[in-house]
Image (cartoon, rainbow, N blue to C red):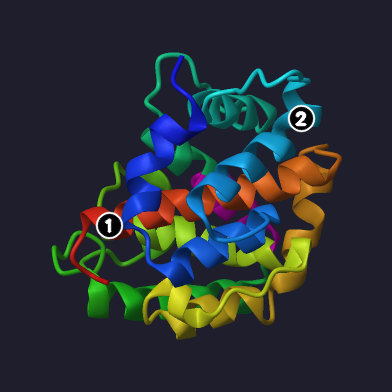
Protein backbone atom coordinates (compact mmCIF):
# COMPACT_ATOMS: atom_id res chain seq x y z
CA UNK A 1 0.00 0.00 0.00
CA UNK A 2 1.48 3.34 -1.04
CA UNK A 3 2.14 6.05 1.52
CA UNK A 4 0.63 9.52 1.69
CA UNK A 5 3.88 10.94 0.35
CA UNK A 6 3.89 8.61 -2.65
CA UNK A 7 0.28 9.35 -3.57
CA UNK A 8 0.38 13.11 -3.05
CA UNK A 9 3.99 13.78 -4.00
CA UNK A 10 3.29 14.98 -7.54
CA UNK A 11 0.37 17.22 -6.54
CA UNK A 12 2.38 18.82 -3.73
CA UNK A 13 5.43 19.24 -5.97
CA UNK A 14 3.37 21.17 -8.53
CA UNK A 15 1.54 23.29 -5.97
CA UNK A 16 2.41 26.95 -5.54
CA UNK A 17 3.56 28.21 -2.13
CA UNK A 18 0.18 29.86 -1.54
CA UNK A 19 -1.60 26.58 -2.30
CA UNK A 20 0.69 24.61 -0.01
CA UNK A 21 0.12 27.24 2.65
CA UNK A 22 -3.66 26.80 2.37
CA UNK A 23 -3.41 23.03 2.78
CA UNK A 24 -1.00 23.47 5.68
CA UNK A 25 -3.50 25.82 7.32
CA UNK A 26 -6.34 23.32 6.91
CA UNK A 27 -4.32 20.49 8.43
CA UNK A 28 -2.53 22.66 11.02
CA UNK A 29 0.83 21.58 9.61
CA UNK A 30 4.06 22.90 11.08
CA UNK A 31 4.90 24.67 7.82
CA UNK A 32 4.02 24.60 4.13
CA UNK A 33 6.79 22.11 3.40
CA UNK A 34 5.35 18.99 1.70
CA UNK A 35 6.88 16.68 4.32
CA UNK A 36 5.23 18.69 7.10
CA UNK A 37 1.89 18.52 5.25
CA UNK A 38 2.21 14.75 4.94
CA UNK A 39 3.06 14.52 8.63
CA UNK A 40 -0.02 16.62 9.48
CA UNK A 41 -2.18 14.23 7.48
CA UNK A 42 -0.77 11.39 9.52
CA UNK A 43 -1.41 13.11 12.85
CA UNK A 44 -4.97 13.98 11.88
CA UNK A 45 -5.54 10.29 11.14
CA UNK A 46 -4.36 9.02 14.50
CA UNK A 47 -7.72 8.88 16.25
CA UNK A 48 -9.42 7.71 13.05
CA UNK A 49 -7.22 4.72 12.35
CA UNK A 50 -5.37 4.24 15.62
CA UNK A 51 -2.05 3.91 13.81
CA UNK A 52 0.92 4.03 16.13
CA UNK A 53 4.61 3.38 15.99
CA UNK A 54 5.11 4.94 12.59
CA UNK A 55 2.59 2.76 10.76
CA UNK A 56 1.38 5.26 8.19
CA UNK A 57 -1.96 4.92 6.36
CA UNK A 58 -2.08 5.69 2.66
CA UNK A 59 -3.99 8.66 1.27
CA UNK A 60 -6.32 6.16 -0.43
CA UNK A 61 -7.11 4.60 2.95
CA UNK A 62 -7.87 8.02 4.41
CA UNK A 63 -10.26 8.90 1.57
CA UNK A 64 -11.99 5.51 1.80
CA UNK A 65 -12.45 5.90 5.56
CA UNK A 66 -13.98 9.36 5.13
CA UNK A 67 -16.24 8.08 2.33
CA UNK A 68 -17.42 5.22 4.52
CA UNK A 69 -18.25 7.61 7.36
CA UNK A 70 -20.32 9.70 4.95
CA UNK A 71 -22.21 6.66 3.68
CA UNK A 72 -20.50 6.64 0.28
CA UNK A 73 -19.74 3.33 -1.45
CA UNK A 74 -15.98 3.13 -1.91
CA UNK A 75 -15.06 -0.44 -2.83
CA UNK A 76 -13.36 -0.53 -6.21
CA UNK A 77 -13.68 3.24 -6.71
CA UNK A 78 -10.63 5.28 -7.71
CA UNK A 79 -9.44 7.78 -5.12
CA UNK A 80 -9.98 10.72 -7.50
CA UNK A 81 -13.59 9.67 -8.01
CA UNK A 82 -14.10 9.24 -4.27
CA UNK A 83 -12.84 12.78 -3.72
CA UNK A 84 -15.56 13.98 -6.10
CA UNK A 85 -18.23 11.90 -4.34
CA UNK A 86 -17.22 13.38 -0.99
CA UNK A 87 -17.49 16.88 -2.47
CA UNK A 88 -20.94 16.00 -3.85
CA UNK A 89 -22.07 14.77 -0.44
CA UNK A 90 -21.02 18.04 1.19
CA UNK A 91 -22.55 20.18 -1.55
CA UNK A 92 -25.86 18.28 -1.59
CA UNK A 93 -26.17 18.43 2.19
CA UNK A 94 -25.58 22.17 2.20
CA UNK A 95 -28.04 22.66 -0.66
CA UNK A 96 -30.78 20.85 1.24
CA UNK A 97 -30.37 23.31 4.13
CA UNK A 98 -30.50 26.45 2.00
CA UNK A 99 -33.56 28.65 1.56
CA UNK A 100 -35.04 29.16 -1.94
CA UNK A 101 -33.46 32.63 -2.09
CA UNK A 102 -30.07 31.25 -1.10
CA UNK A 103 -30.34 28.56 -3.75
CA UNK A 104 -31.15 31.17 -6.39
CA UNK A 105 -28.16 33.28 -5.34
CA UNK A 106 -25.88 30.25 -5.40
CA UNK A 107 -27.12 29.14 -8.83
CA UNK A 108 -26.55 32.62 -10.23
CA UNK A 109 -22.98 32.83 -8.97
CA UNK A 110 -22.07 29.28 -10.03
CA UNK A 111 -23.58 29.92 -13.47
CA UNK A 112 -21.50 33.07 -13.77
CA UNK A 113 -18.33 31.20 -12.79
CA UNK A 114 -19.10 28.41 -15.27
CA UNK A 115 -19.65 30.82 -18.13
CA UNK A 116 -16.42 32.62 -17.39
CA UNK A 117 -14.07 29.72 -16.66
CA UNK A 118 -15.58 26.56 -18.15
CA UNK A 119 -13.74 26.66 -21.46
CA UNK A 120 -15.12 23.27 -22.47
CA UNK A 121 -18.67 24.52 -22.05
CA UNK A 122 -19.94 21.36 -20.37
CA UNK A 123 -21.35 23.24 -17.39
CA UNK A 124 -22.19 26.60 -18.90
CA UNK A 125 -24.80 25.02 -21.17
CA UNK A 126 -26.82 23.62 -18.26
CA UNK A 127 -29.86 25.44 -16.93
CA UNK A 128 -29.06 24.20 -13.41
CA UNK A 129 -25.45 24.08 -12.27
CA UNK A 130 -26.50 22.28 -9.11
CA UNK A 131 -28.00 19.45 -11.18
CA UNK A 132 -24.91 19.31 -13.39
CA UNK A 133 -22.55 19.12 -10.43
CA UNK A 134 -24.49 16.50 -8.51
CA UNK A 135 -25.91 14.23 -11.19
CA UNK A 136 -23.32 13.98 -13.95
CA UNK A 137 -19.87 12.61 -14.52
CA UNK A 138 -17.53 15.51 -13.89
CA UNK A 139 -14.06 16.38 -15.07
CA UNK A 140 -11.83 19.42 -15.26
CA UNK A 141 -13.52 22.63 -14.23
CA UNK A 142 -16.64 20.81 -13.02
CA UNK A 143 -14.61 18.96 -10.40
CA UNK A 144 -12.84 22.17 -9.44
CA UNK A 145 -16.08 24.13 -9.09
CA UNK A 146 -17.75 21.39 -7.04
CA UNK A 147 -14.80 20.77 -4.71
CA UNK A 148 -13.90 24.41 -4.14
CA UNK A 149 -17.52 25.38 -3.44
CA UNK A 150 -17.92 22.51 -0.99
CA UNK A 151 -14.64 23.52 0.62
CA UNK A 152 -15.87 27.06 1.08
CA UNK A 153 -18.69 25.73 3.24
CA UNK A 154 -16.44 23.93 5.70
CA UNK A 155 -13.40 26.15 6.12
CA UNK A 156 -15.15 28.52 8.53
CA UNK A 157 -16.15 25.52 10.68
CA UNK A 158 -12.52 24.81 11.53
CA UNK A 159 -11.61 28.47 11.89
CA UNK A 160 -9.71 28.70 8.59
CA UNK A 161 -10.09 31.67 6.27
CA UNK A 162 -8.46 30.93 2.95
CA UNK A 163 -7.63 33.82 0.63
CA UNK A 164 -9.88 34.14 -2.40
CA UNK A 165 -6.79 33.68 -4.58
CA UNK A 166 -6.82 30.04 -3.52
CA UNK A 167 -10.00 29.66 -5.55
CA UNK A 168 -8.49 31.18 -8.70
CA UNK A 169 -10.70 34.22 -9.47
CA UNK A 170 -14.03 32.77 -8.41
CA UNK A 171 -14.37 35.09 -5.44
CA UNK A 172 -18.01 35.97 -6.07
CA UNK A 173 -19.19 32.35 -6.10
CA UNK A 174 -17.18 31.46 -3.04
CA UNK A 175 -18.29 34.60 -1.22
CA UNK A 176 -21.89 33.42 -1.46
CA UNK A 177 -21.28 30.13 0.26
CA UNK A 178 -18.94 31.34 3.00
CA UNK A 179 -21.04 34.45 3.58
CA UNK A 180 -24.83 34.33 4.08
CA UNK A 181 -25.00 30.53 4.12
CA UNK A 182 -21.67 29.87 5.82
CA UNK A 183 -23.41 29.00 9.07
CA UNK A 184 -24.79 25.84 7.48
CA UNK A 185 -21.36 24.22 7.51
CA UNK A 186 -21.29 24.21 11.28
CA UNK A 187 -24.08 21.66 11.43
CA UNK A 188 -22.82 19.25 8.80
CA UNK A 189 -20.54 17.24 11.05
CA UNK A 190 -23.36 16.84 13.57
CA UNK A 191 -25.68 15.58 10.81
CA UNK A 192 -23.09 12.98 9.79
CA UNK A 193 -22.30 12.18 13.45
CA UNK A 194 -18.62 12.90 12.92
CA UNK A 195 -16.98 13.88 16.18
CA UNK A 196 -13.48 15.07 16.84
CA UNK A 197 -11.25 17.52 15.04
CA UNK A 198 -9.82 14.85 12.74
CA UNK A 199 -12.74 14.68 10.29
CA UNK A 200 -13.20 18.42 10.51
CA UNK A 201 -9.74 18.76 8.99
CA UNK A 202 -9.50 15.63 6.86
CA UNK A 203 -12.67 16.35 4.87
CA UNK A 204 -11.69 19.94 3.94
CA UNK A 205 -8.18 18.70 3.09
CA UNK A 206 -9.62 16.08 0.73
CA UNK A 207 -11.86 18.70 -0.89
CA UNK A 208 -8.92 21.03 -1.30
CA UNK A 209 -6.76 18.32 -2.88
CA UNK A 210 -9.58 17.43 -5.28
CA UNK A 211 -9.84 21.06 -6.38
CA UNK A 212 -6.06 21.39 -6.61
CA UNK A 213 -5.75 18.20 -8.66
CA UNK A 214 -8.39 19.44 -11.11
CA UNK A 215 -6.77 22.86 -11.31
CA UNK A 216 -3.38 21.34 -12.11
CA UNK A 217 -4.87 19.15 -14.82
CA UNK A 218 -7.01 21.93 -16.36
CA UNK A 219 -6.34 25.25 -18.04
CA UNK A 220 -8.55 27.60 -16.03
CA UNK A 221 -6.01 28.84 -13.44
Q: Is residue 15 above or below residue 51?
A: below
Inter-mark Cα distance, 2 to 1: 29 Å
Query: Dot 1, how many residues are within 10 Å of its Cα: few (below 14), some (14-19), or many (20+)?
Result: some
| Image position, residue 144 (x, y; %) | 37, 59
**Residue 88 seen by the camera:** yes
Nearest to N terminus: mark 2 or mark 1: 2
Look at the numbered disc 1 and give the secondary structure of its residue: helix
Please report the bounds of the magenta region as a residue range.
87-97
Residue at image mark 1 = 216
Residue at image mark 2 = 46
Q: Is residue 47 above or below residue 94?
A: above
Relative to residue 219, is residue 75 drawn left or right?
right
Q: Mark 2 against mark 1, which lies toward the viewer?
A: 2
Tell me where residue 53 sits by quadrant: top right
Q: Give yes or no for residue 24 being in the magenta stretch.
A: no
Q: Residue furthest bottom?
A: 172
Q: Is residue 212 above or below residue 76?
A: below
Query: Dot 2, how many residues are within 10 Å of its Cα: few (below 14), some (14-19), or many (20+)?
Result: some
- Numbered marks: total: 2
Q: Give yes or no for residue 94 being in the magenta stretch.
A: yes
| Image position, residue 123 (x, y; %) | 26, 62
Amino acid sequence: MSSIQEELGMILAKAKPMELGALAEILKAESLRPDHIVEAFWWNCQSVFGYVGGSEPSYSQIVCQVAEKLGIEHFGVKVEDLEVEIARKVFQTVWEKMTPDQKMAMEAELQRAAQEFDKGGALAGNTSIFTALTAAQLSGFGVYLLASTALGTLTSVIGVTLPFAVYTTMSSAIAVIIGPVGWIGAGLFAIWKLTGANYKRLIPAILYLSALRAKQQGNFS
